[in-house]
Image (cartoon, rainbow, N blue to C red):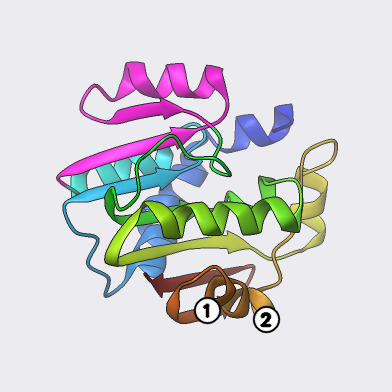
C-alpha cells in the first residue's frame, strides 16, 4: 500500500466506517462459526471488530510489518504471516473466512482466483466465505496511485466463486462497494 493508503486505513474515519457500516453490512445475517480466518487484515481495524465477535480468529497477512504490529496489538488473535494464494493451513481448517477491502490488492485476476481456491480448500464443508471490496471512483483511484489495484468486477464475481468450488454465491452492490457470500 502507498503512504496515503496506509495512513487512511488507520484513521478514525475509516475505523468508524468499518465498525458502523462496512462490517455490519458485509456480515448481516451471517453465522461465522467458532474458528474464523481473516485474509489480508492490513492494519487490523476489521480484526478489532472481528476479535470481539468470534471465539477463535486467525489473521493471514502478507506484509511482515503489518503482521508484526497486529500480533502485538492482539495477543488473542493468531496472526500468521503468509500469502493467501498459497495458504499455510491444512484442508478444512476454518468454519468461515472473511476478506474486507483487500481483494483489489491481489495483483492479478489469476492470483485472485488462486486465493479463492485456497479459501475453498481451507474451509470446512458448509463453511462460509464472506466479505466486501470496493468499486472504482476517482477518489479510489487517486488513493491507489503507485499502489497495487486490480479491481474485482462485482458482476462476474459470483461466477468466479462458483468456478473456485463454492455454492450459492451471491454478490450485492452498493455505492462504492460490493459484498459477497458463498459456501463450501
Residue 174 visible in the current orientation: no
Mark 1–mark 2 CB contact (< 8 Å): yes
Residue hosting label 1:
171
Segment tinted magenta in the rendering: 55-82
Residue hosting label 2:
155
- Residue at 42%, 55% in the rendered image: 121
Question: Which quadrant, please, contains the C terminus?
Answer: bottom left
Residue 146 visible in the current orientation: yes
User: Is 60 covered by the magenta stretch?
Assistant: yes
Q: Secondary structure at mark 2?
A: helix
* Alpha-carbon span between mark 1 and mark 2: 8 Å
Label 1, residues with CA under 10 Å away: few <14, some 14-19, many ≥20: some
Indicate the position of residue 94 as horizontal and vertical percent values. 28, 51
Indicate the position of residue 39 as horizontal and vertical percent values. 46, 45
Frontmost residue, 106 versus 145: 106
In this rendering, would 67 be left or right of 156?
A: left
Indicate the position of residue 125 as horizontal and vertical percent values. 28, 66
Q: Secondary structure at mark 1?
A: strand
**Mark positioned earlier in the residue sequence (1 or 2):** 2
User: Is 53 covered by the magenta stretch?
Assistant: no
Frontmost residue, 71 versus 80: 80
Amino acid at each position: 500500500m502507498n503512504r496515503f493508503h496506509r495512513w487512511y486505513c488507520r484513521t478514525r474515519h475509516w475505523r468508524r466506517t468499518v465498525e458502523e457500516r462496512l462490517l455490519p453490512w458485509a456480515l448481516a445475517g451471517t453465522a461465522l462459526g467458532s474458528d474464523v480466518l481473516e485474509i489480508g487484515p492490513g492494519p487490523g481495524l476489521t480484526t478489532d471488530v472481528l476479535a470481539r465477535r468470534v471465539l477463535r480468529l486467525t489473521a493471514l497477512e502478507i506484509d511482515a510489518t503489518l503482521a508484526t504490529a497486529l500480533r502485538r496489538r492482539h495477543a488473542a488473535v493468531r496472526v500468521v504471516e503468509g500469502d493467501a494464494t498459497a495458504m499455510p493451513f491444512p484442508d478444512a481448517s476454518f468454519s468461515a473466512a472473511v476478506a474486507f477491502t483487500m481483494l483489489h490488492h491481489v495483483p492479478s485476476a489469476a492470483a485472485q482466483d488462486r486465493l479463492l481456491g485456497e479459501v475453498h480448500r481451507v474451509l470446512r464443508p458448509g463453511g462460509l466465505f464472506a466479505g466486501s471490496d470496493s468499486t472504482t471512483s476517482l477518489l479510489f483511484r487517486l488513493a491507489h496511485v503507485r499502489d497495487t489495484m486490480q479491481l474485482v468486477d462485482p458482476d462476474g464475481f459470483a461466477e468466479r466463486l462458483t468456478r473456485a468450488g463454492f455454492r450459492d454465491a451471491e454478490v450485492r452492490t452498493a455505492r462504492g462497494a460490493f459484498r459477497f457470500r458463498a459456501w463450501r
